[in-house]
Amino acid sequence: MADSMSLRVEGLRELRQSLRELGPQMSERVLSGALRAAAADVEAEIRSRAPVASARHRRGKQPGELLRSIRTTVEWQSSEEARVSVGPRVPYGHLVEAGHAIVPRGPTRRGRKLGKEGRARLRALLKARQASGAIGRAQARPFVGPAWEATKDRVVETFKRAVIRTVEEIRALHRIGARNRGSGTGGTV
């Protein structure tokens, strides 16, 4: 699996003009909402494919922890570019997705301070662990990559529809507001 998957939406000239009319703050809100709407489909697909352990992991991880960590975030890189991240937020998500070597656990400090002798002994034990190599391989259980492949064609259409719908709603509100101001029914008392 790749570290990230990207999709670039270009063109959309009419859409860009409509967003300019709204102003920078409102257009960022509209686009953020549309990006989240487009990512919701991907997030739902990832959730449906995420593996859930049948029992508690020996290191204390609860079944479903990976599934519960799946989130969508929108980060604006500039006024023209946003990065949307959809996927698990646990530090081991990529290991489940891609698989990994199973390496025997070595000694740990367990919170103790080590003196010079202790550090040397720990280094020697870690080198022995590295030399012993992997004792097996945890099988890859891809769920993010296949979810993206299944939904990527719908993402752009969902994004476009969400932006157009929101822009039309805002324009309708502006028309209603202008009509109310023109008839004397709007304003403060």
Image (tube, rainbow, N blue to C red):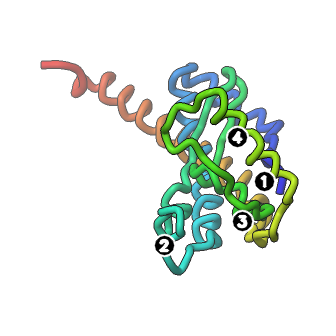
Cα distance in 3D space between marks 3 and 4: 46 Å
Cα distance in 3D space between marks 2 and 4: 33 Å
Cα distance in 3D space between marks 4 and 1: 12 Å
Q: Label 3: which residue?
A: 147
Q: Which of the 4 image quarters holds residue 109?
A: top right
Sequence-first disc among 2 and 4? 2
Q: Label 2: which residue?
A: 56
10 Å crowding of disc 3: few (<14), some (14-19), many (20+): many
Q: Say which residue appears at 57% left-offset and 37% top-offset.
A: 32
Cα distance in 3D space between marks 1 and 2: 26 Å
Tell me the mark number nearer the camera, choosing from 2 and 3: 2
SS at mark 4?
Answer: helix
Task: Kindly check if marks 2 and 3 are in contact, taking CB atoms under 8 A apart as contact.
Answer: no
10 Å crowding of disc 2: few (<14), some (14-19), many (20+): few
Q: Could you tell whether 18 is left or right of 68 in the image?
A: right
Q: Position of residue 124 (x, y in %)?
A: 77, 43
Task: Kindly check if marks 3 and 4 are in contact, taking CB atoms under 8 A apart as contact.
Answer: no
Cα distance in 3D space between marks 3 and 1: 36 Å
Q: Amino acid at mark 1?
A: Arg
10 Å crowding of disc 4: few (<14), some (14-19), many (20+): some
**Residue 161 seen from this side:** no
SS at mark 3?
Answer: helix
Q: Amino acid at mark 2?
A: Arg
Judging depth in this view, the residue of 169 and 72 nearest the camera is 72
Sequence-first disc among 3 and 1? 1
User: In the displayed image of the protein, which residue is found farthest to the bottom?
Assistant: 54
Judging depth in this view, the residue of 187 and 9 nearest the camera is 9
